């Protein structure tokens, strides 16, 4: 059977994706530590594209999600979720997130961490597990608990409604218990020497004769009969196993703290899917054989064996690059003696002995890389670099318009969302700590604790690749989470919060996987040549210069320059985005958005607006091309020549991007709106720092009014709840309000104020609340 390949990356959550479930073959439901449940609907089958919407906005971490199939009463089915607030929420997925729930089930006294839906019952029931040491059965129609499953000695981490009259629970007391649907305990047995977390029902005709599987903190998957007889053990995971699922084929799927999802057939691991995240919290299987995973890097991912549902080349390349570029905490790999490790030659001279085998390699630069053996591909696959400490999910993270090696969580007060602490290894920990404390209005006595926290958790991590959304494997307290309330020093009066507005620096988005782009362009160019399209293919000289030109581009992203190599590359890239077939243009657009920042001369040789119009990147309905095109325009502000071009072509650029500020029939695309609000920030900086670039004061005021109208529309759109989009839009608004007014130019202050209040009213993030306060003085 074919290997699973990435089908789609579902990005929108702002914190760990804790639970996932397929509502149907074309709809995924996910829940997150960001207090939301999202519904993802397939809008384009090939390559797979999903739109998302908020199904539920809670007030605390949401850790478990389930789905009740459609019925006459509820034709869209029902989404069930539970979390830290101990409430089980049941609602129709198509209704607004602020609508009343169909049912709110109260009874648990602690975090709800496991949910399952009844099988074989005439009406729907739910079974839930909680940190309060109990499991409960719930009648959905009546909205009440019908039984409490007693006898657990600790948290109930897993629940499984096996059939009409059998319910199974997995407990932190190391036991598995089998109950009847009436709540009567039928059987209890010790299943492990450690916490048991996960359960899944196996196909009735499983060759092993087992009825269900369990797994937990010992990393071992065990197969059981309903009499509690252990049939088999599956070994391979090197850390906690969080969830299990069963495919229609009968294969078992598992997700783990070892960064992997594994596929098991006839007792053997047949595929290992490494993720660019510390924790793969959840996995679920679809009726069509696809799987979906949720991880600590805030992304849910769909994988498929069907060639028709495999993601496009960009999706595949981005996933592979993220895995390869991720950082692996040394703690996960055990003791490593660099001197005894083989060099890179090992990877081509020695084969692995089993699927998922891990081999450490000593690289020429002294780093240690990890590689896993793929039986299907018969090759070693690079899955990341081992670092002494990693406080992140394993990939560069964008935060407030910049990329960081780390974005730590800092718990200030129990029950409230953590604050984000961004850090790059090139920075001074004490300077970062001081600035962060000032920004968040915290006592300056915390500075030593914060600085020491940064130093401790970044020792040895000098690669500039580790980053992410949270520093620990466990979202409710880890050894790498800092809690300043533990400090014993006296607390003085809060320091003054540093103001953000007006924004004074231009923002660019230039991080790219240049080697992958280069490889893809070479492959596509060969396709064109085979098809006899020499008229649009790169010529031999361009092909020969491509590697060195891209290397020049990579070195120029942080320091724009004039260069004949960049000039030649820009000629080739403009040909690609305007002349190559639509499906081949993405790599060219990716390079174009880097070139508009890095090349001081590109706007002298090419009309970027005309090229983007001809490419139809902003009008073809493809969110990926729209995102890259808008990023290319935003990156113009990375050098003086680009700023002049952007000022001279304001009307043309605005006409191109304005439609993307308007509400759509479907869900909004987070990446497009982040790029769009970044562009608006850059125009705002231009209009406030260099108003003469736009001509007369009246012209500058008119342009500011036009941009404010866009931002009012974005902030007033109830579908836009992404905090990064909201934050950037607010920064742009606050900066544009500093542009001096002019006679005859009207700004609808009331509309702006209303949109700002809508966008900030429900936010719990200090940075957004701080901006709301600053905007109050301007509106």
Image (cartoon, helix red, strand yellow):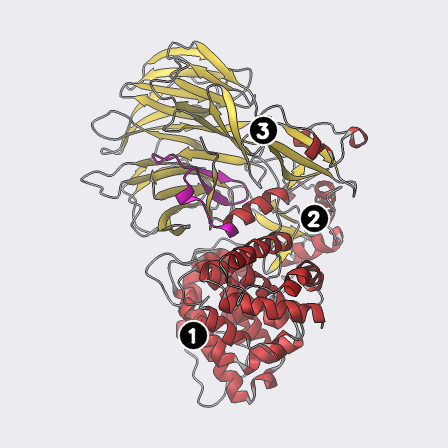
Q: CA distance from mark 2 to mark 3?
A: 44 Å
Range shown magenta: 286-314
Q: Residue furthest right?
A: 339
Check the image and report above or below for 559 versus 98.
below
Q: Quadrant of residue 715?
A: bottom left
Decide if residue 137 is on the left or right side of residue 443: left
Image quadrant where one finds the N terminus: top left
Check the image and report above or below for 563 versus 770.
below
Residue 234 versus residue 485: which sits nearer the camera? 234
Q: CA distance from mark 1 to mark 3?
A: 53 Å
Q: CA distance from mark 2 to mark 1?
A: 42 Å
Circle nearer the N terminus (2, 3)? 3
Mark 2, residue position: 446
Residue 268 versus residue 707: which sits nearer the camera? 268
* Label of residue 356 in the image: 3
Mark 1, residue position: 709
């Amino acid at each position: 059977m074919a290997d699973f390949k990435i089908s789609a990356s579902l990005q929108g959550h702002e914190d760990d994706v804790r639970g996932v479930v397929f509502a149907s073959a074309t709809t995924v439901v996910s829940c997150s530590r960001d207090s939301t449940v999202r519904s993802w609907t397939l809008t384009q089958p090939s390559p797979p594209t999903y739109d998302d919407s908020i199904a539920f906005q809670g007030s605390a971490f949401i850790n478990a999600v389930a789905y009740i199939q459609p019925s006459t009463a509820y034709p869209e089915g029902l989404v069930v979720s539970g979390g830290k607030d101990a409430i089980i929420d049941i609602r129709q997925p198509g209704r607004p997130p602020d609508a009343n729930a169909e049912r709110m089930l109260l009874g648990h006294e602690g975090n709800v961490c496991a949910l399952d839906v009844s099988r074989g019952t005439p009406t729907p029931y739910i079974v839930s597990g909680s940190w309060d040491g109990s499991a409960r059965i719930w009648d959905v129609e009546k909205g009440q608990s019908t039984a409490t499953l007693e006898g657990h000695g600790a948290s109930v981490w897993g629940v499984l409604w096996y059939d009409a009259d059998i319910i199974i629970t997995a407990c932190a007391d190391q036991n598995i218990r089998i109950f009847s649907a009436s709540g009567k305990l039928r059987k209890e047995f010790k299943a492990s020497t450690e916490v048991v977390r996960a359960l899944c029902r196996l196909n009735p005709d499983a060759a092993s004769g087992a009825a269900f599987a369990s797994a937990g903190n010992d990393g071992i998957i065990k197969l059981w009969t309903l009499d509690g007889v252990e049939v088999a053990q599956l070994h391979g995971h090197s850390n906690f196993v969080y969830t299990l699922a069963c495919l229609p084929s009968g294969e078992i799927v598992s997700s783990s703290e070892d960064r992997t999802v594994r596929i098991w057939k006839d007792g053997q691991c047949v595929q290992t899917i490494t993720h660019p995240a510390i924790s793969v919290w959840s996995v679920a299987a679809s009726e069509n054989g696809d799987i979906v995973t949720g991880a600590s890097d805030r992304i849910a991912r769909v994988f498929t064996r069907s060639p028709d549902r495999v993601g496009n080349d960009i999706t595949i390349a981005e996933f592979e690059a993220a895995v390869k570029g991720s950082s692996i905490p040394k703690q996960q790999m055990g003791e490593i003696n660099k001197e005894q490790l083989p060099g890179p030659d090992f990877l081509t001279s020695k084969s692995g002995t089993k699927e998922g085998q891990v081999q450490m390699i000593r690289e020429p630069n002294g780093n240690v890389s990890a590689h896993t053996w793929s039986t299907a591909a018969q090759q070693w696959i690079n899955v990341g670099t081992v670092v002494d400490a990693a406080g992140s999910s394993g990939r560069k993270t964008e935060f407030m318009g910049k990329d960081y090696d780390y974005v730590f969580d800092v718990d200030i007060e129990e029950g409230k969302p953590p604050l984000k602490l961004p850090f790059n290894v090139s920075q001074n920990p004490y300077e970062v700590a001081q600035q962060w404390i000032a920004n968040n209005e915290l006592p300056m006595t915390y500075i030593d604790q914060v600085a020491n926290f940064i130093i401790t958790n970044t020792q040895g991590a000098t690669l500039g690749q580790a980053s992410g959304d949270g520093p620990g494997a466990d979202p409710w307290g880890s050894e790498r989470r800092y809690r300043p309330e533990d400090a014993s020093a006296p607390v003085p009066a809060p320091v003054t919060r540093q103001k953000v507005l007006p924004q004074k620096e231009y923002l660019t988005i230039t991080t790219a996987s240049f080697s992958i782009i280069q490889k893809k362009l070479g492959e596509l160019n060969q396709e064109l040549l085979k098809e006899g399209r020499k008229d649009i293919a790169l010529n031999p000289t361009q092909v020969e210069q491509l590697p060195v030109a891209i290397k020049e581009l990579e070195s120029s992203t942080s320091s724009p320059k004039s260069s004949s190599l960049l000039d030649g590359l820009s000629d080739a890239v403009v040909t690609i985005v305007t002349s190559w077939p639509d499906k081949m243009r993405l790599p060219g657009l990716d390079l174009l958005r880097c070139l508009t920042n890095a090349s001081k001369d590109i706007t002298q040789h090419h009309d970027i607006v005309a090229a983007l119009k001809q490419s139809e990147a902003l009008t073809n309905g493809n969110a990926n091309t729209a995102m890259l095109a808008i990023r290319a325009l935003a990156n113009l502000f990375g050098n003086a020549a680009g700023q002049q071009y952007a000022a001279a072509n304001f009307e043309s650029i605005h006409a191109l991007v304005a439609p993307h500020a308007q509400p759509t029939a479907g869900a909004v695309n987070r990446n497009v709106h982040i790029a769009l609000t970044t562009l608006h920030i850059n125009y705002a900086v231009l209009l406030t720092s260099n108003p003469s670039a736009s001509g007369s004061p009246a012209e500058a005021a008119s342009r500011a009014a036009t941009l404010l109208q866009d931002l009012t529309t974005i902030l007033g759109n109830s579908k836009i709840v992404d905090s990064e989009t909201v934050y950037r839009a607010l920064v742009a608004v606050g900066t544009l309000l500093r542009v001096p007014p002019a006679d005859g130019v009207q700004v609808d202050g009331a509309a702006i104020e209303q949109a700002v209040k809508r966008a900030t009213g429900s936010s719990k993030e200090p940075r957004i609340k701080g901006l709301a306060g600053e905007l109050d003085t301007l509106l």
